[in-house]
Image (cartoon, rainbow, N blue to C red):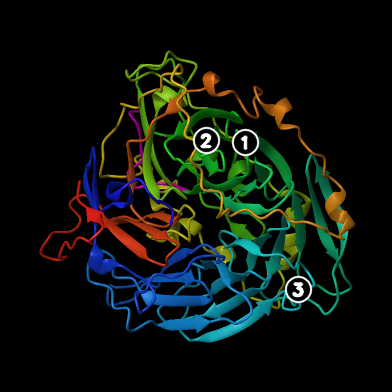
Amino acid sequence: MAAEGGGKELNEIKTQFNTREGVYKLLTHSEYSRPNRVPFNSQGSNPVKVSFANVNDQSGNGDRICFNVGRELYFYIYKGVRKAADLSKPIDKRIYKGTQPTCHDFNHLTATADGVSLLVGFSAGQVQLIDPIKKETSKLFNEERLIDKSRVTCVKWVPGLERLFLVAHSSGNMYLYNVENTCGTTVPHYQLLKQGKNYSVHTCKSKSTRNPLLKWTVGEGALNEFAFSPDGKFLACVSQDGFLRVFNFDAVELHGTMKSYFGGLLCMCWSPDGKYIVAGGEDDLVTVWSFVDCRVIARGHGHKSWVSVVAFDHYTTSVEDADPMEFSGSDEDFQGQIHFGRDRANSTQSRLSKPNSTDSRTVHTTYRFGSVGQDTQLCLWDLTEDILFPHLPLSRTRTHTNVMNATSPPAGGGVAGDIVNNVSNNPSTNDSGANTPSNSLSSPLPRSNSLPHSPAMTANNKSSAIASGVSKFATLSLHDRKEQHQETDHKRNHSMGHISSKSSDKLNMLTKSRTDPAKTLGTLLCPRMEDLPLLEPLICKKIAHERLTVLIFLEDCIVTACQEGFIWTWARPGKVGLSSQKQAVSPSGTII
């Protein structure tokens, strides 16, 4: 158990909590788990993960949920805040032998009521493509483990494409696959494509096209998570060596890096506009990194153990500007939206600019994000312009700001873009995703634990307000830097990171050069605690008895999950009434 001793109150979990926008309530009848509802013995198992998809069902109930518990994988109709969960009728259930599912991701471009494409990564290194609606298994990649023998830590479809997906392993390698290609019967041979500080990218040398198309070797130890930016142009990943690295995916170039205060980084997420990244890990902190300035702008302390998941709430995040957005750049910039043979989502981060700060109008910005950890606590945070614009005095007053724009990569996408573009334009297959604007295919539900592509962030919707529910918050407090009360009660038995050992692949050693943590502390890579604002959580509540592994923000609820295999739905303020859900309290639960 994550919390032991200390009396009954220490083990009590909360079934509702208050924020400025209202009360979030746990819907006990919307709990998803294994059909027998028995807590799973989580010792030695992989983290429970959750993925959502919307299949546009004509009945109006098109939401689908997939989650893994131990060796089992479940696929249900997700009824959310509307109706109670019916665990007796899973659409699909799979039990694996000799390996365990570790992560999964839906392809939202191809999801229909008749079929969905679901990628599943496994602890032994394989990746399976299945259709849980048709109950079919299409393909198994890395079946003989010739490409990589280590655990799959993260798998995601490349944004805007139907056939390409990216897989990360605990070996520290990432591989780009094409669902149409085979993996071959021999160990792949590679040719160096590009090399930089602590990373290298290789292409696969073969007479015939085979998987993987590209191999990325990044940092040292496990590559714990990666995510594409909202516009799909950049790739951010966090590793067990404690580094966040952000790459221009098409050009295969390093955009910026950040180092944790100590220990490995386990999770990360992009802000809805792509301007900020939040990362968490073994330093028990959440760290806010500016994509534009390539530097840490704030840290948040509220957890008492490792941070497992961070996620932005783009339904509560608010970016409001009294000035209309204006397009900037030349016609070539618009032509350059198509890379890798896919349409890029229009992004305020790379396509829109704000008027000069000499104008008398103001910008009101608040980002809401959340975090869950191995301390079984849920924390919610607000990030306001007091922190976002440090060149002005820290205060609660609204200020005039000039928000810089990120630089878009040149049209053409670089050498890696050419490689994948050739594959995408292969006449033997039909990639309908390349001709479909991604903003018209955005789903109301996010993929796995990553940020969804929200329609509110596209150029077709000129309004810069990302959510309609909550107005601006500007009451972010700063921690007294003289107060150095540090929690030392850490739970170290369930690390999500896994440092790979004994690799015979000499290619992995091309860019391995250890970074001395003592040399990074106090630099832009890792500023000292006293040199940054320290955020305090809006709320920090214990909501489970076991470590938390999932945090997903949906339009009408928040979804969390713990390692015991329980997936909980928390209704947003005003989204559900007592008449539609009986508010039951577990024997160990309390209402606050």
Q: Are marks 3 and 2 in contact (CB under 8 Å)?
A: no
Instruction: Say above or below: 373 vs 561.
Output: above
- Identify the residue under disc 2: 287
Residue carrying label 1: 262
Q: Which residue is mark 3?
A: 145
Residue that sits furthest to the left in the current view: 579
Is residue 13 rendered magenta in the image?
no
C-alpha gap between disc 2 and disc 1: 12 Å
**69 left or right, relative to 366:** right
- Check disc 1: other Cα within 10 Å, few if <14, some if 14-19, many if 20+: some
**Comparing marks 3 and 1, which lies closer to the viewer?**
1
Residue stretch rendered in magenta on the structure: 310-323
Residue 487 on image: x %, y %: 47, 34
Q: Amino acid at mark 2?
A: Thr
Q: Amino acid at mark 3?
A: Arg
Alpha-carbon neighbours of circle 3 within 10 Å: few (<14), some, or many (≥20)? some
